[in-house]
Amino acid sequence: MVVDKSSEASPLCCALPMYSPKYSSYVTEEDSNDLNHTPKHKRTNVLLTNSASTHDLRRQEVEKEKQDTNSPRGALEACLTRCSISSTSSSLDDPPPNREATENANADAEAGGKNHRASSNWGKFFKHWKRKSMKRLSSFPPLAHRRNKNVDQHIDGLNVHDIYDFQSSLHSFSITDLEIATDNFSPENIIGRGGYAEVYQGILPEGKLIAVKRLIKGTPDEQTAEFLSELGIIAHVDHPNTAKFIGCCIDGGMHLVFWLSPLGSLGSLLHGPSKDKLTWNRRYKVALGTADGLMYLHEGCQRRIIHRDIKADNILLTEDFQPQICDFGLAKWLPKQLTHHNVSKFEGTFGYFAPEYFMHGIVDEKTDVFAFGVLLLELITGHPALDDSQQSLVLWAKPLLDKKEITQLVDPSLGDEYSLEELRRLTSTASLCIEQSSLLRPRMSQVVELLLGQGGVDMTLREDKRNMMQRTYSEDLLDSIEYNSTKYLRDLDHIREVALAS
Ligand SMILES: Nc1ncnc2c1ncn2[C@@H]1O[C@H](COP(=O)(O)OP(=O)(O)OP(=O)(O)O)[C@@H](O)[C@H]1O
């Protein structure tokens, strides 16, 4: 299905100097497949282009990522080139190839065609991985924990300097393991469906519960790309507030395996029949934990990670309501030297988009901060980011926040069972997070302080502090253009209409 809603006269069109003057939005065939699993207003891919197909752009992006050694996929590609070279030119016991040989072989590999090389590399990598690790991927030690550089420099012909830090305890499951665990992927064991995957619950022989994410969308090559993107991030994320990845399986499709989060997603609780379990204290705990997890991704990881799809459905809950950020399918590494990342294709979820993202395709920490602000509003109000009649929670809540009528925002199902002081903290933080100018949004470390009541919400002080810190690209950009809230609301409305009309 293709929807071309060109709108040259639209305010949004005028605000898109970096792109074609003609604004086109497509809901592609791929997306129409998504619709089988995800309500179409919830998830969208919108392209700012009128000259290339979705596939062309996706292919270009994948190629760009492969060559960018700072991207998860690029790091793996670099490693695989060497893996391919070492497996064709030497046995695993041979000494590692010297630099010249590697460069020559690299050149040959280039000449042999990138696409072919890529797929054969992955094939070799997967075979190699399975053969060498069987049950444990201990051949990929975390970089941070390596002790002896010389000993570890080349492991089985792979130069670990080119590999990001795989967790050392990951398992390589066979398809039989997963079939046994999930009762042959019985539909009864499906616990979640996203745009890209079906998630099954399962049980391991030792009695531990797992969640198996089976990628279902697209061709095998596209699934491999999605799988590697997500694997490239989650394999080196480790925090109490991120989903617990335990391994994967590459037989009969692409599978990622996690410990089961017994309460499912925040979205299913908040907008489902068990809403009453979400008392005020638990909501506050979820807000704090999620902020902590996001602060870790942005500021605590070896590399800056932008999640790009923070939403209630992507926050899992443990038995004691500890939130765990999941679904790193859209996540990006942001190298330190880059202020931001630019995307030509919008992926994510309506209701959570930051203005600089849908206007300019800019991705940085502040796009996640905006989405986190929407999540806070969801926790406070119990309303979804976009309701069945496509009304945006931000648009509804903003006037009440501005007028400080905060008690009117509280989820009626909570009655009076909430702390006014905590409500003040959550609402003032949400208010800052959803500022249309990313300059005015706090960073996640500041969000944590604000939520804990330690931030001193004195804006003057915060402004001074901010001026001393490095500004993000989107901060500069939005600061330099006149962008007021009326325009923001108009643009938000417009892009929603364009993408949803079909
Ligand atoms: N470890 C887990 N424990 C319990 N439930 C889970 C787990 N992982 C995923 N789920 C459930 O499956 C759903 C879909 O998972 P996920 O978001 O990873 O899939 P996706 O296809 O990438 O989704 P999206 O369309 O948001 O990209 C989640 O919202 C959650 O309900």
Image: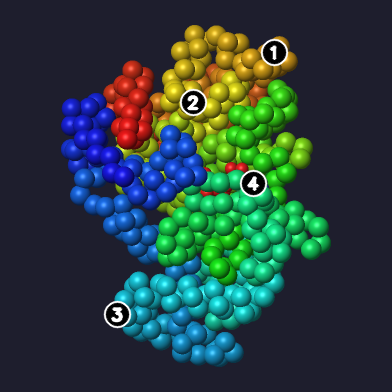
Residue 387 has which mark? 2
Q: Dot 1: few (<14), some (14–19), or many (≥20) neighbours within 10 Å?
A: few
Left or right: where does residue 26 sit relative to residue 219? Answer: left
Residue 111 has which mark? 3
Three-letter amino acid code at disc 2? Asp
Q: Secondary structure at mark 3?
A: helix
Three-letter amino acid code at disc 1? Gly
Question: How far apart are the alpha carbons under marks 2 and 3?
Answer: 52 Å
* Image position, residue 420 (x, y; %): 68, 13
Q: Which residue is mark 1?
A: 415
* Image position, residue 134 (x, y; %): 67, 75
Question: How far apart are the alpha carbons under marks 4 and 3?
Answer: 46 Å
Question: How far apart are the alpha carbons under marks 2 and 1?
Answer: 22 Å
Q: Dot 4: few (<14), some (14–19), or many (≥20) neighbours within 10 Å?
A: some
Question: How far apart are the alpha carbons under marks 1 and 3?
Answer: 68 Å
- Front-most of 232 and 395? 395
Camera-near label (4 vs 1) is 4
Three-letter amino acid code at disc 3? Ala
Q: Quadrant of the C terminus?
A: top left
Question: How far apart are the alpha carbons under marks 4 and 1?
Answer: 31 Å
Q: Secondary structure at mark 4?
A: strand
Three-letter amino acid code at disc 4? Ile
